[in-house]
Image (spheres, grey):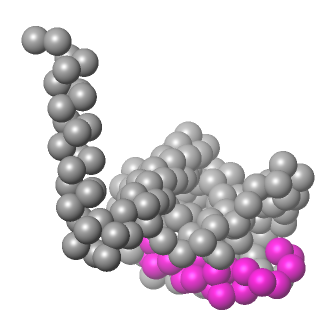
């Protein structure tokens, strides 16, 4: 069978569906197609960010110790630019913790810590990046510190302090450099464009 004919018929069917849907919605066919494309882009960005987080976490030797230096945490800066980074970082963190030697506690505490961090950064996204990244240090330091205290018998202040220090070093060196690199190449924010 000639695949060009088959592909053409599939495209024609899709156009008919869009046309019928456009007529049913008051002729807003162009807007509907735009929404379909932006949603596809959104989910592609989520997958890309999650994949980057997973690879950068799993391949780095200091990602799962009581003194953590996670290069992947520099991706938190993307929350200042892209809506898709929020689920991307949470999903990436969840999957990366499946490889953790701490098991289920790390999956739970680490993922909740990342969720709180990205939420806090999102709420402060209009502030300067030096201020906006503070929730990343606090949320991860406190929750992962609590996890290490409960499950690894490391004193809470030491555990929270070392995790927060590692998070601070990553966010305020690599993260800030990443932020200014994105600004320099005119990486745009998608917070104005709601799909």
Q: Position of residue 83 (x, y in %)?
A: 57, 70
Q: Quadrant of residue 164?
A: bottom right
Residue 47 as seen in the image, left or right of residue 59: left
Q: Position of residue 37 (x, y in %)?
A: 44, 55
| Residue located at (44% from left, 66% from top) | 31
Q: Nearer the viewer, residue 158 or 138?
A: 138
| Residue located at (70% from left, 66% from top) | 189
Q: Position of residue 159 (x, y in %)?
A: 63, 76
Q: Quadrant of residue 139?
A: bottom right
Marks counted in the figure total 0
Q: Residue furthest left?
A: 1
Magenta-colored span: 109-130
Q: Position of residue 101 (x, y in %)?
A: 42, 55
Quadrant of the rendering where the N terminus is positioned: top left
| Residue located at (56% from left, 64% from top) | 85
| Residue located at (53% from left, 64% from top) | 84
Q: Residue furthest top?
A: 1
Q: Is residue 136 above or below residue 8?
A: below
Residue 79 as seen in the image, left or right of residue 26: right
């Amino acid at each position: 069978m000639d695949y060009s004919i088959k592909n053409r018929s599939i495209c024609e069917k899709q156009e008919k569906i869009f046309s019928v849907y456009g007529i049913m919605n008051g002729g807003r066919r162009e807007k509907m197609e735009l929404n379909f494309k932006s949603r596809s882009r959104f989910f592609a960005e989520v997958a890309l960010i999650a994949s980057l987080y997973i690879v950068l976490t799993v391949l780095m030797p200091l990602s799962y110790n009581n003194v953590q230096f996670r290069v992947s945490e520099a991706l938190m800066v993307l929350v200042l630019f892209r809506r898709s980074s929020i689920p991307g970082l949470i999903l990436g963190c969840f999957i990366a913790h499946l490889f953790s030697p701490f098991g289920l506690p790390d999956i739970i505490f680490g993922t909740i810590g990342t969720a709180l961090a990205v939420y806090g950064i999102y709420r402060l996204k209009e502030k300067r990046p030096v201020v906006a990244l503070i929730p990343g240090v606090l949320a991860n330091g406190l929750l992962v510190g609590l996890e290490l205290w409960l499950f690894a018998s490391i004193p809470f202040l030491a555990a929270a302090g070392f995790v927060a220090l590692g998070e601070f070093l990553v966010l305020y060196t690599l993260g800030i450099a990443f932020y200014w690199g994105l600004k320099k190449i005119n990486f745009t924010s998608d917070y104005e464009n709601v799909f």
